[in-house]
Amino acid sequence: MGMDNSKQKTRSAAAVVAAAPVVPPVGEAGVAGADTCAVSVASAESVVPVVPVVDLDHVTKVYTTAAGDTTALNDVSFTVAPGEFVSIMGPSGSGKSTLMNIIGLLDRPTHGVYRLNGHDVDDYDERGLAALRSHEIGFVFQSFNLLPRTSVLKNVILPMEYTGVARAQRRHRAEAALAQVGLPPDLFHHLSNEISGGQMQRVAIARALVNHPSLLLADEPTGNLDTKTGEAVLSMFSELHHEGATIVLITHDLQVARHADRILHIRDGELHEGEFGSDRAPADRASVNRDTDGNSASGGDAA
Ligand SMILES: Nc1ncnc2c1ncn2[C@@H]1O[C@H](COP(=O)(O)OP(=O)(O)OP(=O)(O)O)[C@@H](O)[C@H]1O
Ligand SMILES: [Mg+2]
C-alpha cells in the first residue's frame, strides 16, 4: 500500500480555479472537509498541486466464488479532480457496480491502490472506512433508498446524526439542502413514500448533499424516472457541478452520460476514456491508464 503517497500531480492554476470549490454550498460551512481540503490554489500563473478526489491506481477486483474467480475490474487507473463531473458507462456485467462499490468505500480493491482525497483506503479499518464514507460521499441510487413512513425532512436529517453535526443545526441544514434541490417546503413534512418519484429523487439528492460531501456518487439516478423528470434531475446535477460539486455518475445510457464533462467507458472490467460507439474505438481517444511518469492522461484535455 501507499507506494507513491508523496507523489503530487500538477496542473495549471486556471484548471484548479475552475474546479474549486469541492463542496456544494449548502447551508453554513461544512463539518467534513476541514482536514481533507484537497486543493491548494496559488497565484493564477503558478502551477499548484492537486490531490484528486478519486484516484484509482492499477485497481483490480477479483471475486472468488465456488464457481471460480471473476475479474470484475482489470488494472483500472483514473483520477477525478475536484469539481469534475465524470460519467462511467458500460453494458450489463461490465463492472460498473463493482467500480461504484470501490469508489464509494463499500468494497476494497483486490490489488492496487484507491485513494479518496489522498486517503489510502488500505489505511482504514471498517469503522474508519464507514466514517470516511459518511463524511466524504453522498450516494444517489436508482431506487432512491429513502426511509419509508418517515418524513422527507427526517430523511435528510438522518445522515447528519452519523457525522456529528450539532443537533441545533441539523434541521436548518436539511431545509437548506431541500431548498437547494427545489423541493417545495409544503412537502417537507410529507412521508417519503407519499411523494412522486421525481420528488423522491430530489429528496435523495438533498440527503446526499447535506453532509457536504467531497464526492457525489450516483448510480443510474434517472433509471426509475420518466424522460422529462430524469432530465430535470440531470439538470440538477449539472447545476450542482457548476456550483463546484465533484460528481461521478454511473449509467448504461449514453444520453445520461453526456451530461458530464468526461465519459469513461468500462467493458469487461477495463476502462477507457472518451465517447465511443460503432464509429469510434476507445483506442482513438486518450487512454486513462497511467503513463510512465504516473500521471493519468485524463486530466490533460483542458484546452
Ligand atoms: N459478489 C459477486 N461475486 C462474484 N461475481 C460477481 C459479484 N458481483 C459481480 N460479479 C461479477 O463481476 C462482473 C461485474 O459485475 P457488476 O455487478 O460490477 O456489473 P455491472 O456493470 O454493474 O452490471 P449491471 O449493469 O447489470 O448492473 C460480472 O461478471 C459479475 O457477474
Ligand atoms: Mg450494476
Image: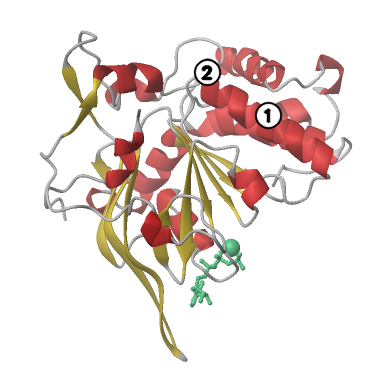
Q: Residue furthest bottom?
A: 67
Mark seen at residue 264: none
Q: Is residue 64 above or below residue 289?
A: below
Coordinates of residue 206 in the picture (x, y in percent): 65, 28
Q: How is the model colour-coded?
A: secondary structure
Q: Is residue 167 above or below residue 250?
A: above
Residue bearing the label numbered 2: 243
- Residue at image position (53%, 26%) is 241
Q: Quadrant of the C terminus?
A: top left
Q: Quadrant of residue 195?
A: top right
- Residue at image position (28%, 24%) is 35
- Residue at image position (58%, 66%) is 91
- Residue at image position (71%, 34%) is 233
Q: Amino acid at mark 1?
A: Ser
Asked if the residue under mark 1 is in contact with the one under mark 2, i.e. CB atoms within 8 Å, the reply is: no
Q: How many marks?
A: 2
Q: Is residue 63 above or below residue 203?
A: below
Q: Amino acid at mark 2?
A: Glu
Q: Is residue 140 above or below residue 223?
A: above
Residue 156 is at least partly visible in this image: no
Depth check, front residue: 126 or 293:
293
Dot 1 falls on a residue whose secondary structure is helix
- The answer to whether residue 34 is left or right of residue 88 is left
Mark seen at residue 235: 1
Dot 2 falls on a residue whose secondary structure is loop
